Image (spheres, rainbow, N blue to C red):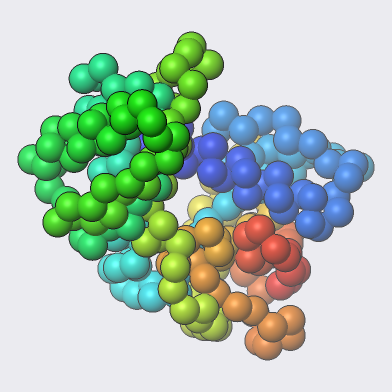
Amino acid sequence: MEKNRIKKTIEGSYARTFLELSKRNNCVIIDENRENPDFLLKDDGGIFGLEVTNIYKDEGKWGSKIKKGESERKKFLRKLSKTYYSSGGKPVELTCLMYSTPADSTLQLIAEGVKTNRDKKELVHSRFEDEYGKFYLYSLPDNEKWSGYSFWQCISDATGTVGTIAESVIKKKLDEKKKRLGQYRLAAQRIVLLLVADHFGASGMLDYKPGEFTIPNSGFDEVYLLTNPEACYRLA
């Protein structure tokens, strides 16, 4: 349930960035608590559906290994924050550089390390290092507003080389998504597909040059590529 909520929040951010960068000032989201398609929107032309999907630079038949690693580390940080706060930890912002994804058996040990360093009264910023990685802490006010703050990040996931979007990856996504067009059109006749290369993660660091390739007719009314958060391109 938590995973789905986080996924929907991220997709909502993509949808709003898409509206801003494509200058759809007269367009509003009217339903975001749904699937197939992910959103219903309304503009001067009426209601249309928006389906959102990510593309990754090492995407193959079995998905993206880089994205899998990112997901595992984010999942670990969510578990770590719960372990930390359930043991009485005070509000803290945590950023880390992980050498690998630690096993769940290390949660209590690392949480104790966070707690010990957070409680150093003379420091607002502190850090510690163990065999699993480097952890950078910023002590937050110990009040209700910041209670349970868990927007913890792994900077390992935001570093990497920029790749090039392969035409084959785009076509593969189109083939996958067009199989559901009939289902999407039960909600709205006009369907827009938004492909996202998210530059906030190493797996989504992909570059696109307008006109680099053409895509076949997929049945979608419009197809866009969002290189989040910088630019949005219409592909079809």
Q: State left or right for residue 142 relative to residue 222.
A: left
Instruction: Tell me the quarter of the picture where residue 216 sits.
Output: bottom right
**Residue 153: % across, % down:** 41, 47
Q: In this rendering, is residue 224 above or below 120?
A: below
The residue drawn where x is 34% and y is 75% is 60
Q: Is residue 185 visible?
A: no
Q: Nearer the viewer, residue 152 or 122?
A: 122
Q: Quadrant of residue 81?
A: top left
Extreme bottom residue here? Answer: 212
Q: Is residue 45 above or below residue 133?
A: above
Q: Residue at x 53, y 59 (%)?
A: 200
* Residue 24 spot, x, y in % from top left: 85, 49
Q: Indicate the quadrant containing the C terminus: top left, top right, bottom left or bottom right.
A: bottom right
- Give the residue furthest to the front: 122
Residue lying at 73% horizontally and 35% vertically, measured from the top left: 29
Residue at the extreme left? 105
State the residue in front, 166 or 83: 83
Residue 212 in view (yes/no): yes
- Number of callouts: 0
